[in-house]
Image (cartoon, helix red, strand yellow):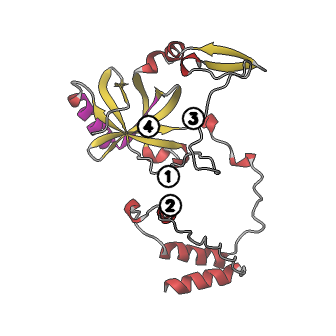
Amino acid sequence: MARSIWNGTITFGLAAVPIKVHSAVEDRSIQFHHVHAKDGARVKQVRICSKEGKEVPYKQVAKGYEVRAGEYVMLDQQEIDAAAGEHSKVIVLDEFVRAEEIDPVYYDRSYYLGAGKDGQDAYRLLHDALERSERVGIGRWVFHNREYLVAVRSLDRVLALHTMRFGEELVKAGSFDIPAPSRKPNRREIEMASKLVDSLHARFDPGSFHDTYRDRVLDLIKAKARGEEPEVPQPPEPEESQDLMSALDASLGSRS
């Protein structure tokens, strides 16, 4: 079993629930290293002091915040940890809301929560209370030198925690130069588009989706490792655009 990445306590009211946090996500990204194109040797990165021009040992590297050009305030890890205050080892659930009230745009990463030492009864109590009320606990969590807004909910037989973005972290859509639609669709276009959406309706099954891009890149790596030089396919030519009604007609026809 993978080790927990954080141990602490969830509190709501005067109740305390010892918990362990486990990542619910496995990073399956393909990891590339920087190598010298001339001879294939691994490229090493070194820390160079911009003032002395010399390599700096890792133990001499500090955290600095730039307050003016070239002037830094340095903090050590103990000072940074102290800034977390009571949230350094405690997640306080301040309120409980309906899950549907949270727009998915606020969600970030997901974690599973396990019961901490002697916390099985309190853990089960929180789980069952959330499940029965169909609510989500909202609180704050300090992790990896930053504070997160979090949502704690029941998920099958366990508790799940989702880190969330604060409101000020989201960029308003109006901040971008997104052209407004040139015209309002007519009634027939809306009806046909709605029929197409209905024809594509399905119950969401995450297991039916697979990272095909990752598979193709791995196949390419294996082929080159065997000494092959696979042909890189050319991107398809863009199809000639057709009017919207014709596209809807053709789409609906292919579904019938």
What secondary structure is marked by label 4? strand
**Upstream in sequence: badge 1 or badge 3:** 1
**What residue span does the magenta drawing correspond to?**
122-140
Tell me if residue 51 comes above or below residue 126 in the rendering. above
Check disc 3 and report the residue beneath it: 166
Residues marked 4 and 2 touching at CB (< 8 Å): no
Q: Amino acid at mark 3?
A: Phe
Q: Amino acid at mark 1?
A: Ile
Check disc 4 and report the residue beneath it: 151
**Upstream in sequence: badge 4 or badge 2:** 4
Q: CA distance from mark 1 to mark 2?
A: 10 Å
Please tell me whether the stretch drawn in magenta is mainly helix, strand or loop.
Answer: helix
What secondary structure is marked by label 1? loop
Q: Nearer the viewer, residue 210 or 219?
A: 219
Q: CA distance from mark 4 to mark 2?
A: 40 Å
Residue 253 lies in quadrant = bottom right
Tell me if residue 82 comes above or below residue 179 in the rendering. above
**Upstream in sequence: badge 4 or badge 3:** 4
**Upstream in sequence: badge 1 or badge 2:** 1
Mark toward the viewer: 1 or 4: 1
Across and down, in percent, residue 129 comes to: 29, 37
How many neighbours does mark 2 have within 10 angstroms: few (below 14), some (14-19), or many (20 or more)?
Answer: some
Tell me if residue 238 comes above or below residue 111 in the rendering. below
Q: CA distance from mark 4 to mark 3?
A: 12 Å
Which labelled disc corresponds to residue 30?
1
Which labelled disc corresponds to residue 134?
none
Across and down, in percent, residue 150 comes to: 46, 34
Q: CA distance from mark 1 to mark 3?
A: 30 Å
Q: Residue at x 38, y 43 (%)?
A: 24
Q: Amino acid at mark 4?
A: Ala
Check disc 2 and report the residue beneath it: 221
Residues marked 1 and 2 touching at CB (< 8 Å): yes
